[in-house]
Image: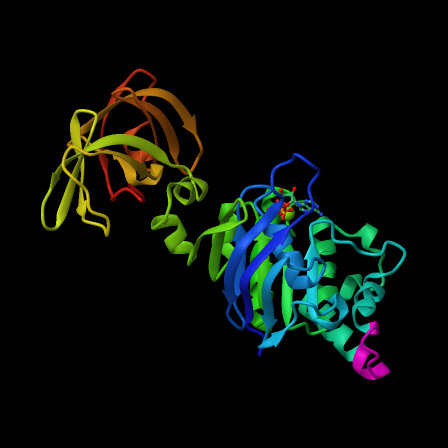
Amino acid sequence: MSKVIFSNISKRFPVAAGAAAGLAVDRLNLVIEEGTLVTLLGPSGCGKTTTLRMLAGFETPSEGAITIGGRDVTNVPVNARNVGMVFQSYALFPHMTVRENVEYGVRLLNLPRQEMKDRVGSVLATMALETYADRSPSRLSGGQQQRVALARAVVTQPKVLLFDEPLSNLDAQLRERMRDELRAIQLRLGITSLYVTHDQSEAMAISDRVVVMRNGVIEQDDTPLNVYSRPGTGFVAEFMGKANILNGRIEAVDQSTLSIRIASTVAFTLPRGSRAFRPGEEVRCVVRPEHIRVDAEGAMQAKVRRVVFQGAYVEYLTDLEGQECVFLDSNYYRTGVAEVGQMLRLSVDSQPVWI
Ligand code: ADP
Ligand code: MG
């Protein structure tokens, strides 16, 4: 069993006199269920790496406790925790071959020679690295080097696997491929994993759960689907993807629906959420660009300010009666591409992700 539990974990770094309080992580509670991959997502400096390093044992929490598989590891040294780590920089040994790099991972375990050879061979096969086994890592591509780093981390059969921005050094296409590869390997091996990234699309693609952090605090801990489409806060709504922030006014509240007036039109009629709204109340609605579409019958009218052709879709930046409104049109090949200055009628396909 290797379920991970962070209980009320805080980390305070010493700060120079007069500087702001050095609280990098603030009373964090987090569970990583056995065999799942949880991602810490958030802007630079929000405490992701510090959280990961406390699980690895490189940092000691100022308060709270961490358990792995029910064992309190809060004060257990790094080498006695049985965790594997994969970094952005790969951290491979350039003077060793691929095989030697992977062997290095298990050497400390003092296994019988044959078992070590078997384990290394099997991991090299899993990672499709057999043909490169006797090469120097410097003669491999970035993606292959990252696979070696992963092989070296999993060869010890760790209870927990930790990733800190492992794909940041790769170019966009390779990053997507490696992302899918990492996830496939993690699922196949069933290793409980904590993954750190600032890239929301990477987080959504790879995770069982996404934990959005801000200033050392968890803003939301949820499935990828929910953090994107049911964000708990405005910060999460905006951080998870492109978002229009439209000012509106509550027009009507009845038993089951809520109507919101954006500019001169009633834009949304939606099921009432948990929060109570009053008629006349000013609200901020977060609407995803892909939920707005060109519609001859649409109630909203917007003037095209900029047209960005993206192949799979056209992105329109428009002026919706004084408010900036971005949306995507993936039907342009049938209807044609609008021009700057043109008026478009729009409708909203879905309720705002956040009010
Ligand atoms: P992230 O990985 O999300 O970018 P970090 O966990 O690296 O963020 O950092 C969180 C906060 O803690 C930042 O304000 C950072 O400056 C501070 N911090 C991190 N490590 C140290 C350290 N060793 N000493 C002092 N402050 C640190
Ligand atoms: Mg970091």
Decide whether residue 113 is among the magenta residues: yes
> Would you place residue 305 above or below residue 185 in this image?
above
Residue at x 59%, y 71% (from the top left corner): 67
- Placement of the N terminus among the 4 image quadrants: bottom right
What is the number of callouts on the image? Answer: 0
Residue 93 or 331: which is nearer the viewer? 93
Residue at x 69%, y 65% (from the top left corner): 84
Q: Position of residue 164 (x, y in %)?
A: 64, 53
Residue at x 23%, y 48% (from the top left corner): 275
Q: Position of residue 131 (x, y in %)?
A: 77, 64
Residue at x 82%, y 51% (from the top left corner): 139
Decide whether residue 292 is among the magenta residues: no
Residue 222: image quadrant is bottom left
- Placement of the C terminus among the 4 image quadrants: top left
Q: Position of residue 22 (x, y in %)?
A: 63, 44
Residue 346: image quadrant is top left
> Would you place residue 300 above or below residue 127 in this image?
above
Residue 24 is left or right of residue 91, and the answer is left
Residue 196 is left or right of residue 269, and the answer is right
Q: Position of residue 266 (x, y in %)?
A: 15, 32
> Would you place residue 107 above or below residue 327 in this image?
below
Residue 28 is left or right of residue 294, and the answer is right
Q: In the image, which residues are magenta?
A: 107-116
Residue 145 or 243: which is nearer the viewer? 243
Residue 175 or 193: which is nearer the viewer? 193
Coloration of the structure image: rainbow
